Amino acid sequence: MSERKQLADWTTGAEAIVYQSCARCGSLQYFRRSFCSACGAADPLDKRASGEGRVYATTLVCRAATPETRAHIPYNIILVDTAEGFRMMAHGDNDLCIGDKVKARFAPFAGRLIPYFEKTK
Amino acid sequence: MSFITGVGLTAYGRHEGCSSLDLMSKAAALAIADAGLKRAEIDGVLCGYSTVSPHIMLATVFAEHFGIKPVYAHAVQVGGATGLAMAMLAHQLVEAGVAKHVLAVGGENRLTGQSRDASIQALAQVGHPDYEVPLGPTIPAYYGLVASRYMHEFGVTQEDLAEFAVLMRKHALTHRGAQFREAISVADVMASKPVALPLKLLDCCPVSDGGAAFVVSRETTSEISVRVRGCAQAHTHQHVTAAPPLSELGAEIAVARAKQAARVAISDVRYAAFYDSFTITLAMLLEDLGLAGRGEAASRARSGYFSRHGEMPLNTHGGLLSYGHCGVGGAMAHLVETQLQMTGRAADRQVRDASLALLHGDGGVLSSHVTMFLERVR
């Protein structure tokens, strides 16, 4: 296993979006692993993303399943193609459209901190 | 060779007081009787899962409960694709000589056995635990994302998607076992409560109680038989965040492999049974598998192409959208209906010609795909 220190990100409460880049094949991955899912090489590098990207897909959630999430409806779940080249799920303004250029901030949701995208000019 | 020798299906909807095992047992008894077999002749058992009563050994729990001692038994789990995956495995097991008569069974009291919130929450866990689930998604939200992108790329509208809810309801009107049997219109779908836009309540399949089963045998047990002509799978991803582009989804890969295995063309197909968890699922699969051009499935539906008397009758029992969705059994009902159509036993739902059928199942968020061709043999 790697001795390299992991960069903290929003999944552990830090205000950051982190992805991994393989030193061997150059592939990017968003879901953290101890290896590259494209070529199997160990210890892909953690990198901090700029938070910039474009909206790939959106869905306005109007029916939630838990009391914690119900307090937030309606909320817009989006997929963002980041400037770095990986895709991620996040929240965003309710009026975002596919193709919009967006930038991330962090917002509280159901007791946690999550990435939240707003439109940029 | 392998044959679908017997099918069993309960009504879907509310079965107060029935456990998952009760519903599985009812469907299994129907399928075995339909095949003209005795329980003791079943030597293989495949089952799915129950979110209400999870168990690490559901197939042997079922076998003990049902009173059989198979030589081969285990559960299969690929979400909505489970039913067809079991059919494919059963086909391979009997071809390999592992068993003579494999019973595949699914059943769950998903509607009355737990709260609707609990059901929605349990299913949302197919999402990534760290990168998706904390964002509060639901299954309709995962498919809502896919729908928004598909509509954007191919010019599909919400009214287009609504056509499929209307079609499935129209088909369900003639099946006494269907959960929903009141006609609906495109306007009704459009006016239904927003769930995960662009998907509204009537774009989504319901939560149901029910059970379904079929027997796959090495030799036919009746005059008109239904043979597995060929089948294949494709698994491209689990999470929607990691899904490939719309042009590279698993449905197209699975059907290409299945066509090769079955040595048939889409133009040979006379009846279609497609997974329809949401209206978008059905629209996309019809286009992915080549039963309509990109963005054209809705206009075909509108013109009656997929209706009972149309050129390509589709889900004549009403599908998940209107017959109901009880988990694993949900899509097994598609296979049950197909077998009834192919053997001329679909009563007032009977289509003119169901000599060759194309079935497709999808699990996760268009993650796991199983395609199967069935042919009638006299």
Image (tube, coloured by chain):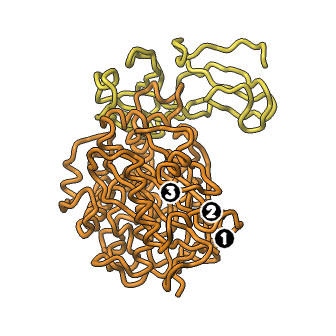
Chain colours: A yellow, B orange
**Cβ atoms at labels 3 and 1 below 8 Å apart:** no
- Give the vertical position of B353 relative to B365 (above or below): below
Q: Of the residues shown, which amino acid type is indicated by label 3?
A: Gly
Chain of the residue on which disc 2 is drawn: B
Label number found at residue A11: none
Q: Position of residue A22 (x, y in %)?
A: 75, 29
Q: Which residue is drawn at 45% across and 53% down?
A: B106
Chain of the residue on which disc 3 is drawn: B
Q: Of the residues shown, which amino acid type is indicated by label 2?
A: Ala
Give the mark nearest the N terminus, 3 or 2: 3
Mark 3 crowd level (few <14, some 14–19, many ≥20, 10 Å Cα): many
Residue linked to disc 2: B232
Residue linked to disc 1: B261
Which is more toward the observer, B236 or B303?
Answer: B236
Q: Which residue is drawn at 52% across and 66% down?
A: B215
Q: Of the residues shown, which amino acid type is indicated by label 1?
A: Ala
In front: mark 3 or mark 1? 3
- Give the vertical position of B340 relative to B78 (above or below): below
**Cβ atoms at labels 3 and 2 below 8 Å apart:** no
Q: Position of residue A52 (x, y in %)?
A: 53, 26
**Cβ atoms at labels 1 and 2 below 8 Å apart:** yes
Residue linked to disc 3: B83
Q: Position of residue B352 (x, y in %)?
A: 37, 84
Give the mark nearest the N terminus, 1 or 2: 2
